[in-house]
Image (tube, rainbow, N blue to C red):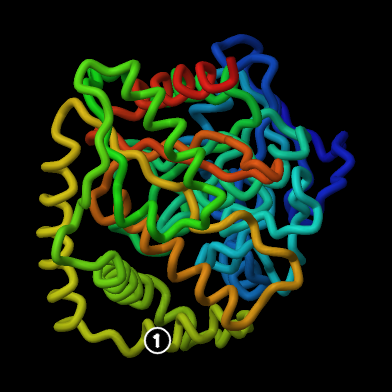
Amino acid sequence: MSSTTTFPIDDTVNAWVPHGRFIIDGAPSGPLAGLRFAVKDVFDVAGHPTGAGNPTWLATHAVPQVSSALVNQLLAAGAQLAGKVITDELAFSIHGDNQHYGMPMNATSPARIPGGSSSGSVAAVAAHLVDFALGTDTGGSTRVPASYCGVWGLRTTHGLLSREGLVPLHPSFDTATWFAHDASTFTRVGAALLSASDFLPRGAVLVEEACMEAEARFQPLLAAVAAQLDAQLAEGARRVAIAPGESLEDWRRTYVTLGAREGWVTHGDWINTHAPRFSEAITERWRAASEVTAETAEVAAQRRKTIRAQVRAVVGTDRVLIVPSAATAAPLRGAGGAEIDDIRARTLRICCIAGLAGLPQVSLPLRDADGLPAGVSLIGPVGSDLALIRLAVDTWRSLQA
Protein backbone atom coordinates (compact mmCIF):
# COMPACT_ATOMS: atom_id res chain seq x y z
CA MET A 1 0.00 0.00 0.00
CA SER A 2 1.51 3.30 -1.09
CA SER A 3 1.71 6.54 0.90
CA THR A 4 1.99 10.12 -0.29
CA THR A 5 2.29 13.49 1.38
CA THR A 6 0.25 15.15 -1.38
CA PHE A 7 -3.08 15.98 0.24
CA PRO A 8 -5.92 16.49 -2.24
CA ILE A 9 -8.66 17.53 0.20
CA ASP A 10 -9.68 21.14 0.75
CA ASP A 11 -10.40 21.07 4.47
CA THR A 12 -13.36 23.45 4.49
CA VAL A 13 -14.49 22.44 7.99
CA ASN A 14 -11.23 22.45 10.01
CA ALA A 15 -11.43 18.70 10.53
CA TRP A 16 -7.78 17.63 10.04
CA VAL A 17 -4.95 17.97 12.55
CA PRO A 18 -1.77 19.58 11.16
CA HIS A 19 0.19 16.32 11.42
CA GLY A 20 -2.64 14.34 9.84
CA ARG A 21 -2.55 15.46 6.21
CA PHE A 22 -1.44 12.39 4.29
CA ILE A 23 -2.92 9.79 1.95
CA ILE A 24 -2.41 6.02 2.12
CA ASP A 25 -3.86 3.98 -0.72
CA GLY A 26 -5.70 0.80 0.12
CA ALA A 27 -5.51 -2.53 -1.65
CA PRO A 28 -6.26 -2.32 -5.38
CA SER A 29 -9.49 -4.24 -4.91
CA GLY A 30 -11.81 -5.23 -2.10
CA PRO A 31 -15.29 -4.61 -0.66
CA LEU A 32 -14.46 -0.99 0.21
CA ALA A 33 -12.59 -0.10 -3.00
CA GLY A 34 -13.41 3.40 -4.16
CA LEU A 35 -14.18 4.70 -0.65
CA ARG A 36 -12.09 7.26 1.21
CA PHE A 37 -11.93 7.44 5.02
CA ALA A 38 -10.32 9.50 7.77
CA VAL A 39 -9.40 8.38 11.28
CA LYS A 40 -9.80 10.07 14.63
CA ASP A 41 -6.38 11.02 15.96
CA VAL A 42 -6.45 8.34 18.63
CA PHE A 43 -5.84 5.53 16.11
CA ASP A 44 -2.25 4.63 15.34
CA VAL A 45 -1.10 4.83 11.72
CA ALA A 46 2.40 3.49 11.11
CA GLY A 47 4.90 6.25 10.34
CA HIS A 48 2.55 9.05 11.44
CA PRO A 49 2.27 10.51 14.97
CA THR A 50 -0.78 10.00 17.17
CA GLY A 51 -1.73 13.21 18.98
CA ALA A 52 -4.88 12.27 20.96
CA GLY A 53 -5.98 15.89 20.70
CA ASN A 54 -3.19 17.28 22.86
CA PRO A 55 0.22 18.69 21.83
CA THR A 56 1.91 17.32 24.96
CA TRP A 57 0.74 13.82 24.12
CA LEU A 58 2.04 14.33 20.60
CA ALA A 59 5.45 15.45 21.92
CA THR A 60 5.86 12.70 24.52
CA HIS A 61 4.90 9.62 22.48
CA ALA A 62 6.95 7.96 19.78
CA VAL A 63 5.67 7.73 16.23
CA PRO A 64 3.97 4.32 15.98
CA GLN A 65 5.57 1.72 13.77
CA VAL A 66 2.43 -0.44 13.59
CA SER A 67 -1.04 0.70 12.54
CA SER A 68 -4.25 0.08 14.38
CA ALA A 69 -5.72 -3.29 13.50
CA LEU A 70 -8.87 -1.57 12.21
CA VAL A 71 -6.90 0.79 9.98
CA ASN A 72 -5.09 -2.19 8.47
CA GLN A 73 -8.38 -4.02 8.00
CA LEU A 74 -9.94 -1.09 6.14
CA LEU A 75 -6.88 -0.60 3.92
CA ALA A 76 -6.84 -4.30 3.12
CA ALA A 77 -10.52 -4.00 2.13
CA GLY A 78 -9.57 -1.42 -0.50
CA ALA A 79 -10.44 1.87 1.21
CA GLN A 80 -8.09 4.86 0.91
CA LEU A 81 -6.98 6.53 4.15
CA ALA A 82 -7.11 10.32 4.05
CA GLY A 83 -5.21 11.19 7.20
CA LYS A 84 -6.11 12.02 10.80
CA VAL A 85 -8.78 14.32 12.13
CA ILE A 86 -9.35 16.30 15.32
CA THR A 87 -10.52 14.78 18.58
CA ASP A 88 -11.39 16.43 21.86
CA GLU A 89 -8.41 16.09 24.21
CA LEU A 90 -7.83 12.43 25.10
CA ALA A 91 -11.46 11.96 23.91
CA PHE A 92 -12.70 13.26 27.28
CA SER A 93 -15.66 15.33 26.04
CA ILE A 94 -18.80 15.19 23.89
CA HIS A 95 -18.71 18.90 22.98
CA GLY A 96 -16.38 19.05 19.97
CA ASP A 97 -14.12 21.96 20.89
CA ASN A 98 -10.35 21.57 21.11
CA GLN A 99 -8.48 24.60 22.47
CA HIS A 100 -5.31 23.60 20.59
CA TYR A 101 -6.76 22.83 17.14
CA GLY A 102 -10.13 24.57 17.20
CA MET A 103 -13.69 23.37 16.73
CA PRO A 104 -14.51 21.66 13.44
CA MET A 105 -17.53 22.97 11.57
CA ASN A 106 -20.89 21.23 11.55
CA ALA A 107 -21.61 21.47 7.80
CA THR A 108 -25.29 20.62 8.27
CA SER A 109 -25.80 23.36 10.86
CA PRO A 110 -22.83 25.78 10.69
CA ALA A 111 -24.02 27.91 13.62
CA ARG A 112 -23.97 24.85 15.87
CA ILE A 113 -21.31 22.62 17.41
CA PRO A 114 -20.38 19.29 15.78
CA GLY A 115 -20.21 17.37 19.05
CA GLY A 116 -17.29 15.29 20.22
CA SER A 117 -15.05 13.70 21.01
CA SER A 118 -15.08 12.38 17.43
CA SER A 119 -15.53 15.95 16.20
CA GLY A 120 -13.18 15.85 13.21
CA SER A 121 -14.50 12.49 12.07
CA VAL A 122 -18.12 13.62 12.04
CA ALA A 123 -17.28 17.00 10.49
CA ALA A 124 -15.36 15.42 7.61
CA VAL A 125 -18.22 12.99 6.92
CA ALA A 126 -21.00 15.57 7.23
CA ALA A 127 -19.17 17.81 4.74
CA HIS A 128 -18.75 14.84 2.34
CA LEU A 129 -14.96 15.29 2.36
CA VAL A 130 -14.65 11.55 3.04
CA ASP A 131 -17.11 8.70 2.63
CA PHE A 132 -16.73 7.44 6.18
CA ALA A 133 -14.52 8.01 9.21
CA LEU A 134 -13.36 5.99 12.18
CA GLY A 135 -14.29 7.36 15.58
CA THR A 136 -14.62 6.05 19.11
CA ASP A 137 -17.47 6.00 21.58
CA THR A 138 -16.95 5.76 25.32
CA GLY A 139 -19.77 7.86 26.80
CA GLY A 140 -21.40 9.04 23.58
CA SER A 141 -18.57 10.28 21.35
CA THR A 142 -20.09 8.83 18.18
CA ARG A 143 -23.80 8.75 18.95
CA VAL A 144 -23.96 12.40 19.98
CA PRO A 145 -22.04 13.93 17.04
CA ALA A 146 -23.96 11.67 14.64
CA SER A 147 -27.18 13.14 16.03
CA TYR A 148 -25.87 16.72 15.94
CA CYS A 149 -24.60 16.49 12.36
CA GLY A 150 -27.27 14.31 10.77
CA VAL A 151 -25.11 11.33 9.77
CA TRP A 152 -25.09 7.60 10.49
CA GLY A 153 -23.17 6.46 13.56
CA LEU A 154 -22.72 3.23 15.49
CA ARG A 155 -21.50 2.40 18.96
CA THR A 156 -20.35 -1.20 18.58
CA THR A 157 -20.80 -4.00 21.10
CA HIS A 158 -18.04 -3.49 23.65
CA GLY A 159 -15.04 -5.64 22.70
CA LEU A 160 -16.40 -6.68 19.30
CA LEU A 161 -13.91 -4.63 17.25
CA SER A 162 -10.21 -4.54 18.03
CA ARG A 163 -8.93 -1.62 20.13
CA GLU A 164 -5.31 -2.54 19.39
CA GLY A 165 -3.41 0.60 18.43
CA LEU A 166 -6.05 2.89 19.96
CA VAL A 167 -5.42 5.46 22.71
CA PRO A 168 -7.74 4.40 25.56
CA LEU A 169 -9.91 6.59 27.77
CA HIS A 170 -12.11 4.34 29.91
CA PRO A 171 -11.12 0.85 28.72
CA SER A 172 -14.19 -1.05 29.89
CA PHE A 173 -16.41 1.42 27.98
CA ASP A 174 -14.24 2.31 24.94
CA THR A 175 -15.48 1.13 21.55
CA ALA A 176 -14.21 1.60 17.99
CA THR A 177 -16.86 3.10 15.71
CA TRP A 178 -17.51 4.81 12.40
CA PHE A 179 -19.66 7.46 10.73
CA ALA A 180 -21.01 7.57 7.18
CA HIS A 181 -23.08 10.16 5.36
CA ASP A 182 -25.30 7.66 3.51
CA ALA A 183 -26.97 4.39 4.44
CA SER A 184 -25.32 2.38 1.67
CA THR A 185 -21.78 3.28 2.74
CA PHE A 186 -22.64 2.79 6.40
CA THR A 187 -23.87 -0.73 5.69
CA ARG A 188 -20.96 -1.48 3.37
CA VAL A 189 -18.41 -0.64 6.07
CA GLY A 190 -20.36 -2.71 8.56
CA ALA A 191 -20.29 -5.73 6.27
CA ALA A 192 -16.51 -5.36 5.92
CA LEU A 193 -15.78 -4.99 9.65
CA LEU A 194 -18.45 -7.00 11.45
CA SER A 195 -19.20 -10.68 11.68
CA ALA A 196 -22.58 -11.99 10.61
CA SER A 197 -25.37 -11.85 13.15
CA ASP A 198 -28.40 -14.14 13.46
CA PHE A 199 -30.34 -11.48 15.38
CA LEU A 200 -34.02 -11.48 14.30
CA PRO A 201 -35.92 -8.75 16.15
CA ARG A 202 -39.47 -9.51 17.23
CA GLY A 203 -40.27 -6.46 19.33
CA ALA A 204 -39.22 -2.94 20.26
CA VAL A 205 -39.20 -1.03 23.55
CA LEU A 206 -39.43 2.77 23.66
CA VAL A 207 -37.49 3.68 26.80
CA GLU A 208 -39.63 6.00 28.90
CA GLU A 209 -36.88 7.59 31.02
CA ALA A 210 -34.62 8.28 28.04
CA CYS A 211 -37.46 9.94 26.12
CA MET A 212 -38.12 12.21 29.10
CA GLU A 213 -34.52 13.49 29.00
CA ALA A 214 -34.88 14.67 25.39
CA GLU A 215 -36.21 17.96 24.06
CA ALA A 216 -39.75 18.16 22.70
CA ARG A 217 -38.37 18.22 19.16
CA PHE A 218 -37.35 14.55 19.53
CA GLN A 219 -40.74 13.24 20.60
CA PRO A 220 -42.44 13.06 17.15
CA LEU A 221 -39.33 11.36 15.75
CA LEU A 222 -39.26 8.79 18.54
CA ALA A 223 -42.96 8.14 18.00
CA ALA A 224 -42.45 7.73 14.26
CA VAL A 225 -39.68 5.17 14.71
CA ALA A 226 -41.76 3.32 17.30
CA ALA A 227 -44.79 3.30 14.98
CA GLN A 228 -42.71 1.95 12.11
CA LEU A 229 -41.29 -0.88 14.24
CA ASP A 230 -44.72 -1.54 15.72
CA ALA A 231 -46.00 -2.22 12.21
CA GLN A 232 -42.87 -4.10 11.16
CA LEU A 233 -42.15 -6.47 14.06
CA ALA A 234 -44.20 -9.46 15.17
CA GLU A 235 -44.53 -8.28 18.78
CA GLY A 236 -44.83 -4.59 17.89
CA ALA A 237 -43.50 -1.73 20.00
CA ARG A 238 -44.36 -0.67 23.53
CA ARG A 239 -43.31 2.14 25.87
CA VAL A 240 -41.61 0.85 29.03
CA ALA A 241 -39.76 2.26 32.04
CA ILE A 242 -36.42 0.45 31.94
CA ALA A 243 -35.47 1.38 35.50
CA PRO A 244 -38.68 1.57 37.58
CA GLY A 245 -38.02 2.99 41.01
CA GLU A 246 -34.53 4.11 39.92
CA SER A 247 -33.06 7.14 38.19
CA LEU A 248 -30.98 7.50 35.02
CA GLU A 249 -29.05 10.11 36.99
CA ASP A 250 -27.91 7.33 39.33
CA TRP A 251 -26.91 5.31 36.27
CA ARG A 252 -24.99 8.30 34.87
CA ARG A 253 -23.10 8.67 38.14
CA THR A 254 -22.20 4.99 38.04
CA TYR A 255 -20.73 5.46 34.57
CA VAL A 256 -18.92 8.69 35.49
CA THR A 257 -17.42 7.20 38.67
CA LEU A 258 -16.21 3.97 37.11
CA GLY A 259 -14.99 5.66 33.92
CA ALA A 260 -13.15 8.36 35.84
CA ARG A 261 -11.26 5.81 37.90
CA GLU A 262 -10.32 3.82 34.79
CA GLY A 263 -9.19 7.00 33.05
CA TRP A 264 -6.97 8.04 35.95
CA VAL A 265 -5.44 4.57 36.30
CA THR A 266 -4.72 4.70 32.54
CA HIS A 267 -3.38 8.25 32.24
CA GLY A 268 -2.79 9.64 35.73
CA ASP A 269 0.97 8.98 35.80
CA TRP A 270 1.41 10.64 32.40
CA ILE A 271 -0.62 13.67 33.50
CA ASN A 272 1.35 14.04 36.72
CA THR A 273 4.67 13.65 34.91
CA HIS A 274 4.07 15.97 31.96
CA ALA A 275 1.46 18.45 33.27
CA PRO A 276 -0.29 18.82 29.89
CA ARG A 277 -2.46 21.88 29.26
CA PHE A 278 -6.12 20.92 28.93
CA SER A 279 -9.24 23.01 28.50
CA GLU A 280 -10.87 24.13 31.74
CA ALA A 281 -13.69 21.57 31.52
CA ILE A 282 -11.38 18.64 30.79
CA THR A 283 -8.91 19.78 33.48
CA GLU A 284 -11.75 19.64 35.98
CA ARG A 285 -12.74 16.14 34.83
CA TRP A 286 -9.19 14.88 35.33
CA ARG A 287 -9.02 16.54 38.75
CA ALA A 288 -12.24 14.80 39.77
CA ALA A 289 -10.99 11.52 38.32
CA SER A 290 -7.84 11.72 40.44
CA GLU A 291 -10.00 11.73 43.58
CA VAL A 292 -12.02 8.57 42.84
CA THR A 293 -10.73 5.81 45.08
CA ALA A 294 -10.43 2.15 44.19
CA GLU A 295 -13.07 1.37 46.82
CA THR A 296 -15.56 3.86 45.33
CA ALA A 297 -14.91 2.49 41.86
CA GLU A 298 -15.50 -1.08 43.06
CA VAL A 299 -18.93 -0.08 44.37
CA ALA A 300 -19.68 1.45 40.95
CA ALA A 301 -18.43 -1.70 39.21
CA GLN A 302 -20.81 -3.86 41.22
CA ARG A 303 -23.63 -1.44 40.47
CA ARG A 304 -22.81 -1.72 36.77
CA LYS A 305 -23.22 -5.49 36.92
CA THR A 306 -26.77 -5.02 38.21
CA ILE A 307 -27.63 -2.39 35.61
CA ARG A 308 -26.12 -4.46 32.81
CA ALA A 309 -28.20 -7.49 33.77
CA GLN A 310 -31.31 -5.32 34.02
CA VAL A 311 -30.89 -3.76 30.56
CA ARG A 312 -29.92 -7.01 28.89
CA ALA A 313 -32.99 -8.69 30.38
CA VAL A 314 -35.24 -6.10 28.74
CA VAL A 315 -33.45 -6.45 25.40
CA GLY A 316 -33.35 -10.24 25.60
CA THR A 317 -32.32 -11.95 22.38
CA ASP A 318 -34.98 -10.55 20.07
CA ARG A 319 -35.84 -6.97 21.03
CA VAL A 320 -34.48 -3.49 20.39
CA LEU A 321 -34.62 -0.41 22.58
CA ILE A 322 -35.60 2.95 21.07
CA VAL A 323 -33.91 6.00 22.61
CA PRO A 324 -32.97 9.53 21.52
CA SER A 325 -29.34 9.70 20.38
CA ALA A 326 -28.83 12.92 22.36
CA ALA A 327 -30.88 15.10 24.68
CA THR A 328 -30.97 18.15 22.41
CA ALA A 329 -30.22 19.38 18.95
CA ALA A 330 -26.64 20.59 18.58
CA PRO A 331 -26.08 23.63 20.84
CA LEU A 332 -25.03 26.91 19.28
CA ARG A 333 -21.27 27.35 18.96
CA GLY A 334 -21.25 30.15 21.53
CA ALA A 335 -23.11 28.18 24.20
CA GLY A 336 -21.27 27.41 27.40
CA GLY A 337 -21.34 27.29 31.17
CA ALA A 338 -24.41 25.94 32.93
CA GLU A 339 -26.28 25.37 29.66
CA ILE A 340 -23.65 22.98 28.33
CA ASP A 341 -23.24 21.28 31.70
CA ASP A 342 -26.98 20.58 31.78
CA ILE A 343 -27.02 19.26 28.20
CA ARG A 344 -24.02 17.04 28.91
CA ALA A 345 -25.64 15.54 32.00
CA ARG A 346 -28.96 14.89 30.27
CA THR A 347 -27.24 13.36 27.25
CA LEU A 348 -25.04 11.10 29.38
CA ARG A 349 -28.15 9.84 31.18
CA ILE A 350 -29.35 8.57 27.81
CA CYS A 351 -26.00 7.36 26.47
CA CYS A 352 -25.02 5.49 29.64
CA ILE A 353 -27.73 2.88 29.00
CA ALA A 354 -25.87 1.16 26.14
CA GLY A 355 -22.50 1.98 27.68
CA LEU A 356 -23.18 0.33 31.02
CA ALA A 357 -24.80 -2.66 29.29
CA GLY A 358 -22.01 -3.02 26.69
CA LEU A 359 -24.58 -3.10 23.87
CA PRO A 360 -24.52 -1.83 20.26
CA GLN A 361 -26.45 1.31 19.34
CA VAL A 362 -27.14 2.73 15.87
CA SER A 363 -28.13 6.39 15.43
CA LEU A 364 -30.55 7.07 12.57
CA PRO A 365 -30.07 10.51 10.96
CA LEU A 366 -33.46 12.23 11.21
CA ARG A 367 -34.60 15.87 11.09
CA ASP A 368 -37.04 17.65 13.37
CA ALA A 369 -39.86 19.96 12.29
CA ASP A 370 -37.38 22.85 12.04
CA GLY A 371 -35.05 20.86 9.80
CA LEU A 372 -32.39 20.39 12.48
CA PRO A 373 -30.62 17.02 12.77
CA ALA A 374 -31.95 14.96 15.67
CA GLY A 375 -30.93 11.32 15.86
CA VAL A 376 -33.04 8.44 17.12
CA SER A 377 -31.22 5.24 18.12
CA LEU A 378 -31.84 1.52 18.22
CA ILE A 379 -30.03 -0.57 20.87
CA GLY A 380 -29.75 -4.31 20.26
CA PRO A 381 -28.39 -7.43 21.97
CA VAL A 382 -24.69 -8.24 22.29
CA GLY A 383 -23.15 -8.97 18.89
CA SER A 384 -26.22 -7.96 16.90
CA ASP A 385 -24.37 -5.01 15.33
CA LEU A 386 -24.59 -5.96 11.65
CA ALA A 387 -28.24 -7.03 11.83
CA LEU A 388 -29.00 -3.91 13.88
CA ILE A 389 -27.50 -1.72 11.16
CA ARG A 390 -29.72 -3.38 8.58
CA LEU A 391 -32.82 -2.98 10.74
CA ALA A 392 -31.99 0.68 11.32
CA VAL A 393 -31.44 1.30 7.60
CA ASP A 394 -34.70 -0.48 6.66
CA THR A 395 -36.57 1.56 9.28
CA TRP A 396 -35.03 4.82 8.11
CA ARG A 397 -35.84 4.10 4.48
CA SER A 398 -39.44 3.33 5.36
CA LEU A 399 -39.69 6.66 7.18
CA GLN A 400 -38.31 8.49 4.12
CA ALA A 401 -40.80 6.84 1.74
Left or right of 127 on screen, residue 195: left
Q: Residues within 10 Å of mark 1 (few under 14, many from 20)?
A: some
User: Could you tell me residue 184's position as x and y percent?
Assistant: 58, 17
What is the quadrant of the N terminus in the image?
top right
Query: Is residue 63 shown to the viewer in this render?
Result: no
Rendered image quadrant of residue 38: top right
- Quickly name the residue at label 1: 288
Residue at figure coordinates x 75%, y 56% from the top left: 104
Which residue is situated farthest in the top direction here?
A: 29
- Residue 274 vs residue 348, the one in the foreground: 348
User: Could you tell me residue 25's position as x and y percent?
Assistant: 70, 25
Amino acid type for the residue under numbered disc 1: Ala
What is the quadrant of the C terminus in the image?
top right
Residue at figure coordinates x 66%, y 63% from the top left: 331
User: Could you tell me residue 175's position as x and y percent?
Assistant: 39, 47
Left or right of 71 on screen, residue 2: right
As helix, strand or loop, the secondary structure at mark 1 comes to: helix
